[in-house]
Structure formats: C-alpha cells, structure tokens
Amino acid sequence: MSSLRRIASAAAALAITASGLVLGSAPAQALENGLLRTPPMGFNNWNSTQCRAEFSETMIKGIADIFVSKGLKDAGYTYVNIDDCWALPARNSAGDLVPDPARFPHGIKALADYVHAKGLKFGIYTSAGTKTCNTAGFPGALGHEQQDANLFASWGVDYLKYDNCNNQGVDAQQRYKAMRDALAKSGRPIAYSICEWGQNKPWTWAAPVGNLWRTTGDISDKWSSMIGKAQTNRGLAQYAGPGHWNDPDMLEVGNGGMTAVEYRTHFSLWAMMAAPLLIGSDLRKASDDSFAILENTDVIALDQDPLGKQATVLSANGGLVVYGKVLANGDRAVALSNETAATATISTTASATGIGSAASYTLKDLWSKAVRSTTGTISASVPSHATVLYRVSSRGGTRYEAESATLSAGGTVDANHAGFSGTGFANGANAVGSYVEWQVNGPASTLTFGYANGTAAARPVDIAVDGTVVATGVPFPPTGAWTTWSTVTRPLSLAAGAHTVRLTATTADGPANLDYLDVSP
C-alpha cells in the first residue's frame, strides 16, 4: 500500500475561520493516495444498528470473526467499519475525541488491532461539521481536521467515512479538501469516503479529493429506495474509475425489507456500477440465502474488475433496463433488469455491448451458473424486480480492449473515430519507440490485433512477449480511413499463465490506432 503524498506547498493549505472563509490564495493540490484501485468491500454497522445499544465492541469483533469463519474475507471483503455514535458527546481536555467506554471498553485502537490481527482493515466515521448526524450531538471534525486525522492514524484507522451534518454552511469543497489534506499529513494511508449525499454534485469535483463520494441520500431497506439510488447513480459512469468511485450507499442485503429476488437485483446492480460493496446487515443474524448473495464470486468479480469501468445503460424502456459493462479481459457483463410489477422479456445483442464480431458468444448466467451460446441475441424472461446477469465472452478466445492497455508517454485512449470495439482505441504517440502493451493470459497460439491506419504508408511495429522481441517490423497496412478497421494476425505460442504483449513502433509515425488484441487458443 503506497503512502500518501504530501501537499507540495504550505501556501496551498486550507484553513477554516469562524466566518468560513478560505485562507491562502492557491487551491490545494490533488492527492493520489494509491488506495481503493477497486471499489471497497467490507461492512458498516449503520443500516442494521444505527445508534442502538447492540452497536458495540462485541458486535464489531463478532463481525470480524464472521468475515474469516464464513469466507467473506476470502471473497474479498476487507474493511470492518464503524459508523456514528462511537464517541462520547464531548471532547476531552486536550480536545481529542473519546470513545464511549460503555460501547468500546477497550478503546478504538484495541478494536482496530483485533481487526488487523484477522488480516482485515478498520474504518471509522465522523462528520465535516461541528457535530455528527445523530441527535445526541457527538462532536464533528470541522475545525479539528488535523487533530482528528492524527488521532485516527494513531489508532490504526484505514478508512474514514466523512459525513455532511451540521456543516455550518461552510463550502463543501473547502470542508472535504481540508480533511483530505489532514489525512495526507497524518502519516498513515487512510481511504477517504466523502458522504456529502450528492448535494453539491461531488462527482464533478471529488476525484482528486476522495476515493469515493456518495451520489445519493441515505438508502433504506425497501425496493423503492434501493432502485431509486440505482437510477440516480447509473447516469454517472463517466466519473468513476480506479481510486475514485461513485457511491450509491451501503448494501441492505439481509436486513429483511426486500425479497431475495430484490436483494439479488440490489447486489447485481451495485456490482455492475462498480459501487462499494459494504455489507449493512448484522451478519451474526444473517441467513444462508444472504451469505449466498454476498459471496457470489462471479458477481463480485464484476465489481472488482481491474479495468474499473462502471456499467452504462444500453437501453431503458418503461422500466426494462439493459446495462453493459466493459471488463479488463475483453468480456462484457450484461444486466437485464426489470423494475416493473410484471414479468417481461428483456433483450439486447452482443453487438450493442461493443464486444466485437464473432461467430458465437458464450453467456454465463452469474446467478444460476447456466452456460449457453448465442450468435448474438441476449434475451431472457425476467420476473418482476429481478435481474438476469450475464458474462459475455467471444467463443474460442479472449478479447483485450485498448482501454485495458498501457500506453507509452504521449499515447491516449480516444473515441473520435467511429467503428471501434469497446469504448475507445489506443492512439499511440507519433514517435519511434512509442508502444501499446497488454497484460494477457495464455495458453494461446494466435494473436489478432484490431487496428485502423488512415495514412498512405504502413505503420510497422516490433512485437515483444514478456520483454523478448518475437517479431520485427510487422506491418500494419493502410486501411483507407481512420474509421475503417482491419486486423493483423500473427501465429504465436503463449504458455499457460500471465504474459505481457507489447507493440513498439519502429518509425516516426508511431503505431496504427489499435482497437483490441484477441488471444486465441
């Protein structure tokens, strides 16, 4: 886990005065803290306990135990987070927050140590205001940012949820940047969750401030609330990516207010939207059905896909919604979601997902685990409030889109020439040595590169596998236009396992525009 970068100039620091003004003429620089390259997975007690007496050290330790004993840790759940009501209503004489000794008799550091000993991480809560959200009036962090950040770091906190109550009208960006800067100076990597409820459109400004930001108000354990949060969040895909995620609030799976069908839809849509998967139910009381939903590793894999793409809406008609999600290995995920009160047939096509042309495709139903093939149609009869979730693969090989490639300096992933597969193509720099590189999996016998070359001359490249050049001066001939796409195929044996495939330009024109790499057995 990389350490947080410090702010480069003290002149950029933010200070909060009694009037709420910002001191200092330069804005704080963006921090890249290296955390949450995939959406966070874990637990938060609020949805199941709120401030009731059962929220305690005993409960949180029990949750950490269950993470290990029931396989949640192995499935990827990492963070055990506590919410509001953990502190006393007043700071001590030194101005520090004090854990409630009735709830946490051994203190927060001891609890964090217990969680860490399980191989898990620990999260805490406060508010970007003078008090937190609970009516008991627990102290917030406004004006105490550095003191509280240092205290959290000394306790071993790994994750901070920072709420929005009692903010005294101070500008939201100012308040959340102040805590960002305080966490950066605390000396400990702490994932930063901005709980601003979407009031000031944080998706437009929070990427350099926090690792995730709430896009909605609080969720509740009923269908109308959950699907409403999904409807708000699903239009914000362009703002999400590794290290900065849209957050439609925590999971309600297992709390009892929805049916199993509705909870599967809840979990499916959160995974498609690359949302945090923070369990909100008391796992000590959860049913086997709830664990089966929460531990569906095929669905979790969509949420945790390293490409970090949030699903987009491919179609929406009268409550029948089709979502599509680009995955790092070139596959697509498709959700057919029925928001209506009656069973309905929902359909799309492989072509609509951008996966590219193939003779046939494999569809794996991620809930039933049934596998079938199709020549292009993706369709299902979907019951009311249900979601059918497929992983779609081109049969006979794996496609790696340009969006998942690494480009040398000056290269970009663009979308200004139509006809490409996926969501963009690799436009390498016009220079000798400019490269495009994919991480792929073998075994394979053939590599096929989709490309366009709108010039009158070929654009040759050297092909290297795992650092060794295996083909020199491979031509990518003109295609007639930048919107005309063709392929170059090379026989090449790859052993089973992970490999790096790099195309390096050998002329000053750089490589052709590269759309994808197909790896075929």
Image: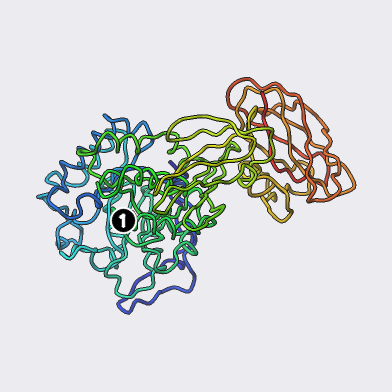
Return the x and y of residue 153 as percentages of the image width and height: 30, 49
Q: Quadrant of residue 65?
A: top left
- The residue located at (76%, 24%) in the rendering is 491
Return the x and y of residue 97 as percentages of the image width and height: 20, 58
Q: Is residue 221 left or right of residue 503?
A: left
Q: Is residue 367 left or right of residue 474?
A: left
- The residue located at (47%, 53%) in the rendering is 244
Residue closest to the far right: 456
Secondary structure, mark 1, is helix
**Front position in the image: 85 or 249:** 249
Quadrant for the N terminus, please.
Answer: top left
* Crowd around label 1: few <14 · some 14–19 · many ≥20 (10 Å): many
**Given the image, on which type of amino acid does mark 1 rest?**
Ala
- The residue located at (16%, 44%) in the rendering is 57
506 w.r.t. 166: above or below: above
221 w.r.t. 505: above or below: below
For residue 385, say whether it is visible.
yes
List the residue tagged with mark 1.
149
Q: Is residue 252 left or right of residue 513?
A: left
Return the x and y of residue 174 as percentages of the image width and height: 40, 69
Return the x and y of residue 318 as percentages of the image width and height: 49, 58
Q: Is residue 117 left or right of residue 437?
A: left
Residue closest to the far bottom: 19
Label count reads 1
